[in-house]
Image (cartoon, rainbow, N blue to C red):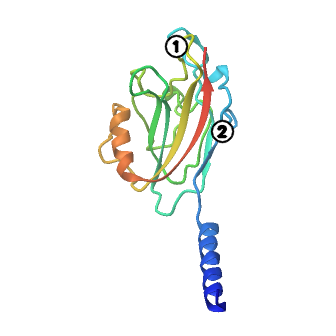
């Protein structure tokens, strides 16, 4: 290899790594749920035979991509025996200055959501958080908690708390700049 070709290749490698170092990556964490760990009873649904406290976990995120104008948060169980999974929590239009939700924010009666944020309908048929509650005897289900960095301040089609998870997902498909997922497990 000639000295020029070697220098050119080395410069390309350095540029590639410099770009990676400067790029931010959206991350999601929770003091209540660890990646791949069992979800505690306080976060489990109360009803359908489950006896938890139905308290949403505290969440925090960082590393939003440039151009982020809002965030959305969703919890989905892809293992639910429905053919399409089960939506446990859908929150959207979170202001870009918000990078955390406190424990219990999923209870609409507590009014812990920031102004402008909307909690919409879950597969339990109501808005707000609905914790894990898989069928008895199933292997532990995966509960995928995802934060979405969104390029609009308000989703264009999902207007209020009556929006279905599918409608919110449709909007997010076209407006997501980045996302991060944390997965907890629960079985009974």
Compared across the picture, whether 46 is left or right of 33 comes to left
**How far apart are labels 2 and 1 at the CA level?**
25 Å
Q: Secondary structure at mark 1?
A: loop
Q: Which marked residue is nearer to the observer: mark 2 or mark 1?
A: 1
Q: Residue furthest left?
A: 157
Query: Which residue appears farthest toward the top when viewing the image?
Result: 49
Q: Quadrant of the C terminus?
A: top right
Percent position (x, y) of residue 78?
48, 29
Q: Residues within 10 Å of mark 2 (few under 14, many from 20)?
A: some
- Secondary structure category for the residue under label 2: loop
Q: Where does residue 10 sit, x and y in percent of width and height? A: 65, 80
- Camera-side residue: 141 or 124? 141
**Res 85 quadrant in image:** top left
Q: Position of residue 86 (x, y in %)?
A: 44, 26
Dot 2 or dot 1, earlier in sequence = 2
Query: Does residue 46 lie above or below 3 as drawn?
Result: above
Residue marked by disc 2:
30
Q: Which of the 4 quarters of the picture holds residue 187?
A: top right
Give left or right: position of 9 versus 96: right
Answer few, some or many: residues within 10 Å of disc 1's Cα (few below 14, many 20 plus, some between 14 and 19).
Answer: some
Which residue corresponds to the image point at 66% horizontal and 39% vertical from the top-left? 30
In the rendered image, residue 125, in percent from the top left (x then y), is placed at 39, 21
Which residue lies at the image location 58% right of the left edge and 49% below the top edge? Answer: 99
| Label 1 sits on residue | 135
**Vertical arrangement, residue 4 with respect to residue 186, above or below:** below
Quarter of the N terminus within the rendering: bottom right
Residue shown at 68%/32% (left/top)? 32
């Amino acid at each position: 290899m000639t000295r020029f070709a070697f220098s050119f290749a080395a410069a390309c490698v350095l540029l590639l790594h410099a770009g990676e170092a400067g790029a931010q990556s959206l991350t999601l964490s929770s003091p209540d749920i660890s990646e791949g760990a069992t979800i505690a009873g306080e976060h489990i649904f109360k009803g359908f035979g489950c006896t938890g406290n139905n308290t949403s976990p505290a969440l925090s995120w960082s590393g939003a991509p440039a151009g982020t104008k809002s965030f959305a948060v969703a919890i989905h169980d892809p293992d639910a025996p429905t053919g399409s999974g089960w939506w446990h929590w859908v929150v959207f239009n979170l202001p870009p200055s918000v990078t955390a939700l406190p424990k219990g924010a999923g209870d609409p009666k507590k009014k812990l959501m920031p102004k402008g944020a909307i909690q919409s309908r879950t597969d339990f048929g109501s808005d707000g958080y609905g914790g894990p509650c898989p069928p008895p005897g199933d292997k532990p289900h995966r509960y995928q908690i995802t934060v979405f960095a969104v390029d609009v301040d308000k989703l264009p089609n999902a207007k209020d708390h009556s929006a279905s998870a599918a409608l919110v997902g449709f909007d997010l498909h076209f407006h997501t700049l980045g996302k991060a997922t944390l997965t907890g497990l629960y079985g009974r």
